[in-house]
Image (cartoon, rainbow, N blue to C red):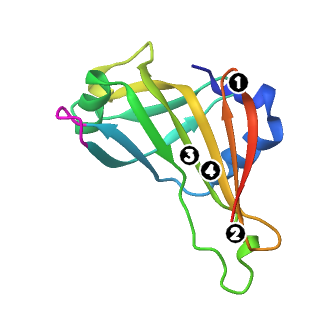
Amino acid sequence: MASWREVSDEAPEFAARVRRLFDARKHKTMATLRRDGSPRISGTELEFGDDEIHLGMMSGSMKALDVRRDSRIALHSPTVDPPDDDPSAWPGEAKIAGRAIPASGDNPADGVRFRVEIDEVVLTHVGTPADHLVIESWHPGRGLERRIRR
């Protein structure tokens, strides 16, 4: 597991592009696991700090109950469609997978906060020329990797 600081220190340009995609709009998508193990998709907001990513939730929400039971999560940036006339101009999409860990200083009346411990960060975009996808990923202990998919 890693913090956002580790990602941004090891791969600063990559981390900046991921953060720009997440910051492009207020609402992101988060996947959690229900009690029976099936996935739940929820809208969420997150906050990038210099060191960590934080999520806030209403204390009785289903997603908060999910992460208290099983901390594994996946986060997806807001997305837009690639431009028809120039698919390589698409900024792409970013994903972060990891665990939601309760942050200190919660006040249940105000909701709960979780910090994200990171297992994986992925950025996917259309290459130039626009005949392939570029998948960049960062993992703790492995660093930044790049794959091409045609």
State the SS at label 1: helix
Q: Position of residue 87 (x, y in %)?
A: 70, 76
Q: Which residues are magenta?
A: 34-38
Q: For the residue marked with disc 1, what is the amino acid?
A: Arg
Q: Mark 1 highlights which residue?
A: 5
Asked if one can make out residue 59 in the rendered structure from this viewpoint, the answer is: no
Residue 61 versus residue 86 in the image, above or below: above
**Tags 1 and 3 in contact by the CB under 8 Å rule?**
no
> How far apart are the alpha carbons under marks 4 and 3?
13 Å
What's the residue at 26%, 23% (across, down)? 69
Q: Mark 2 highlights which residue?
A: 90
**Tags 2 and 3 in contact by the CB under 8 Å rule?**
no
**Tags 4 and 1 in contact by the CB under 8 Å rule?**
no
Q: Mark 4 highlights which residue?
A: 23
> How far apart are the alpha carbons under marks 2 and 4?
16 Å
What's the residue at 59%, 34% (across, down)? 120
**Label 3 environment density (alpha carbons within 10 Å; few <14, some 14–19, many ≥20):** many
- Chain-order first, disc 4 or disc 3: 4
State the SS at label 3: strand
- Chain-order first, disc 2 or disc 1: 1
Q: Position of residue 88 (x, y in %)?
A: 75, 72
In screen coordinates, is 131 left or right of 43? Answer: right
Q: Nearer the viewer, mark 2 or mark 1?
A: 2
Specify the farthest residue to the top: 104
Res 95 label: 3
